Image: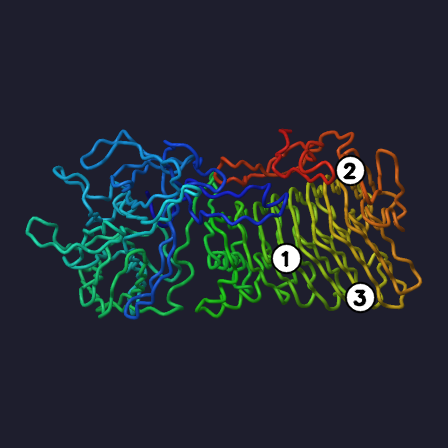
Amino acid sequence: MKIHNHIIPKAIRRHSIRLWLATAITVTATLAALTGCSADNEPENPTGGDGTSVTFGATIATREGHDNGNAPTSRAIPDGTFEEGDWILVHIDGERKVFVYRTAGGFVHDPTISALNVDPTPPEWKSGETGKDVLAYGPTGVIMYDVNEGYVFQCAVAKDQSKDKDYEERDYVYAAQSLDRGNPALTFRHGMTRVVVRLRPGGSLTSEEVAGASVLLGDKNIFLVADIDPQTGTLTAHVPTGGNQLQPQTVTPHRCAATPAGYAVAYEALLPPQDVSGKLFISARLSDGTELGYAAESGSMLEGGHEYIYNVTVEKNRLVVTVTDSDVPWQDGILTTKIDGKEFRLIRTAEDLARFARDVNGDGVTAGSGKTDLNALQVANIDLQELAGSKDAALRALAADWEPIGNDSYTGIYCGNGYTISGLRIKSNHGAGNNGLFGSVNSPALLTGIHLRDVQITGTIGRYTGGLAGLVRSAAVTLCSAEGAIEVTGSTDSGGAALVGGLVGYVNSCSINRCHTTVNIKVDVTLTNLVHVGGIAGWCICSYGNNILFACRADGDVSLTGTGATTFSVPLCAGGIAGYNGSNDNDRSYRIDIYACQATGDVTVTHTGTKAVNAYAGGLVGYNSVLGDLEYSYARGTATATTGGNIPGSAGAIVGYSSGTSTVRKCFGAGAGGKGTSGLEAKEHNIAYNMAPLKGEIKETVADSWWGYDFSTTIYDASATPAYGISVVERVFDRSVWNNGEDLWPAPNMEWNGENK
C-alpha cells in the first residue's frame, strides 16, 4: 500500500449511468472516496445458505484534524489506497487470518500464507448470520514478526525514509468494526502521523542555499515502534524498556515530489503517535556546516491519522517555525496521477475543487496567470456547502456564490467519474457573465461523468447561464446530469443575448450527448436583446463545426417571461430541450442536429408588454432555425406562448416554429394542443401528435427508419478505471439508443456506447 501524493486509486467507485442519468434516482453509496471495491462491483455476498466465503470492500477514510495550538494545524490524511496483492491481518471468529486485496473483488481470504499464529481456514458466513466483529490491520509488511511468536501487535516505521519504498510502504491502517453481511465493507483509518516540513529562505539566505540543506527529525529522541491495541487497532508509541529493544532514533525524512509556491524544499515522514514537547524536533544543516535546530513547544502531541505541517523560515543563525491560516497554502495536499500519459489532479473535497477552480482562473487580472488546461479526476462525492464552515473567508464566500471554473476559458478534461457535486450556489455574475459550475469551456475541453445535485442559480441574469456551464464552444460534454433550479431576472444586455440552459446556456459547435437534467428554469426579463431558454441548452449553433445534442433528456419545466421591446425577430424562445437550434447562415458545411432526445416538462413563454414581440414555445425546441435538424425525438409536456401585442405567440408540442430551411422528422408530441400554432403538420410515420399514446406508438415514430449517425463521444465502461472515458472518440449510433425504458414512454439508453466508426 502506498500513501500520499501521487498514487491513483486502483479502483474508484463508479455509479451506474442507468441510475444517474436515465432515471434520475439519487443513490446513496456506502463506499466513499478512494475505495478498493466499487459501488457497482462489490463482492457478491448472498445472504442465504451455509458456507458463503467472507469477502469485503475497503475504504480508507478521512478524519477531521485538530488545532494543536503549539504546532501547525493537523489535518486528516485522506490519500491511502490499497493495491493489488496487499495483504492484511484480520481477526475474525476468534482467529487471525490473512486477506489479500484484489482490484476486481476487494479483500478475499488467502489460504496460501503459512505463518505462526495465522489460521489458514477460510472464514465463512453461517446460516442466519448477519454480521461479524472484526479487527483488520496492515499491510503485513508493516507488522512486526517474531520467529518464535509469529505476528505481534506492533508495527514500525523506517529510521531512514529518504527512499520512496521506505516511506510509502510504512503507512499502517486499521479497522475495528462489525462487518455487515448485506453490505460487506470496512472503513480503514490511518494509524501513523504524517509530518511535513517546508523550508523557505529568510534574511540573506537564498532559495538554493535552503534547498541544499539536509533535514533531520529529532535527535535520537523519536520513537519508531508503535504498539497496536488488540481491540481497537489504534497505535501508541512503544517506549523501550530493555537494552535489546529499538531505542529512540533520529529520522531522515522523504523529500516531497512537489514543493508549494514560496518554499525552497519540502520533506515528509511517517511517525508513530507520540508527544514531542520540548524535544529537538527539526534540525537543518546548511552547506557551510551551520547546524540549526527547533525544539517543539509544550503540548506538541502528534496524533495518529493526522498530518502536521511545519512551515520553517531558515535564517543564518536560527529556524523560525510559524503557523497561521494563511501560512498553510491551498497548494499543500494536491494529489495527481497520470492516465494515458495525461496528468490529472484528484478532486476529493470541496476545497480541492475550489483550489482547482482558483488555479484554472488565475488571479483574474494578469494575462496567462490561469492554468486553463488543467485536468481533473473526481474521486468522491462533494458538497460545496461544506465550504461555509471554512476558516478562510474566501472559501466561505464560494459556498454562497460560486465563482465558475474558467471565468476566461477552460480547455482541459474534467472527469467526474459518476460522483456528485452538491450545493452549487450562484447569485451574481462573474467575469463575462458566464455562469455555471464552469464558466467558459473551449476546445479541446471534455466534461464527462459530472453529476450536479441541488443546483440553485439565482439573481440577475448573465450572458450565458447553465447548471454545468455557461458557454461551451468546440468541446465535448458527455454523460453528465444536473438537478435543481435556475431563477434569474433583470434586463438583457443590449450588446448580446441572454441564453439559459438546464445544462449549458450557449452551445456552439459541440457534441453534447447522453446527458440528463431535472432543472426547473424560470427567467423573467426586460427585453433589449433576445432571450433563449432550454431544458438542456439555451442556444445551439454551429459556427466552427458540427453541433449535436444526442440522447439527452430534460425533465424540468421551462418558463420565460419578457416585457419591453426589441428589434430582434426571435427574441423570446423556449424549448424542452433547446430554446433555439440553427445555423448563422445557409452554409451547409456543418450539421446542427438534435437527435434521440426526450423532454417531459411544460414550456411557457409569455410577453407581457404591449409591443409587437414574437414568442416561441416548443415541447422540444422553441425555434428550429436555418439548417436546424430535429429528428427521432419526443416531448410529453405542454407548450404555450402568449403575447400582449398584436402578434400571436407560436407554440407546439414539438416545436414553436420551424423555418423553411430546417428539418423536423421522426418526432412525436404528446403535449396538450398538438401542433398548436407552430405550423408543423402531422405526417404519417414521420410527425405525430397524441396526448394519450398507446404502448409502442412513440417508439414506432422515433426509432423508425434509422441509419447510422457518427459523432464524437466518450466510452463508459464500468470495469475500467476511470469508468468514464477521458478520450474523445468517433462512434456510430442508430435506433438501438431507444432500446431502453418502457414501451409507453421510451427513454434513451445512455449506457450504450454505439459502435466503432
Please identify the quarter of the rendering in which residue 108 is found. Answer: top left
Q: Which residue is drawn at 77% across and 45% down?
A: 635
Task: Point out the tag, 3 or 1, that comes first from the N-terminus.
Answer: 1
Indicate the amino acid at tag 1.
Gly
Indicate the amino acid at tag 2.
Ile
Q: In what quadrant of the picture does the N terminus appear?
A: top left
Query: Closer to the camera: disc 2 or disc 3?
Result: 2
Q: Which residue is drawn at 52% across and 60% down?
A: 384
Residue at numbered disc 3: 528
Q: Is residue 730 left or right of residue 338?
A: right
**In the orientation shown, which residue stands out farthest toward the front?**
128
Q: Is mark 1 on a helix, strand or loop?
A: strand
Q: Relative to 207, is 599 above or below? A: above
Residue at numbered disc 1: 484
**In the orientation shown, which residue stands out farthest toward the right?**
646
- Between the residue at mark 3 and the residue at mark 1, the CA separation in whole angstroms equals 28 Å
Task: Point out the tag, 2 or 3, that comes first from the N-terminus.
Answer: 3
User: In terms of depth relative to the viewer, which is nearer, 228 or 631?
Assistant: 228
Residue at numbered disc 2: 698
Query: Closer to the camera: disc 2 or disc 1?
Result: 2
Q: In what quadrant of the picture does the C terminus appear?
A: top right
Residue 180's x, y, as percent?
A: 40, 44
Indicate the amino acid at tag 3.
Thr
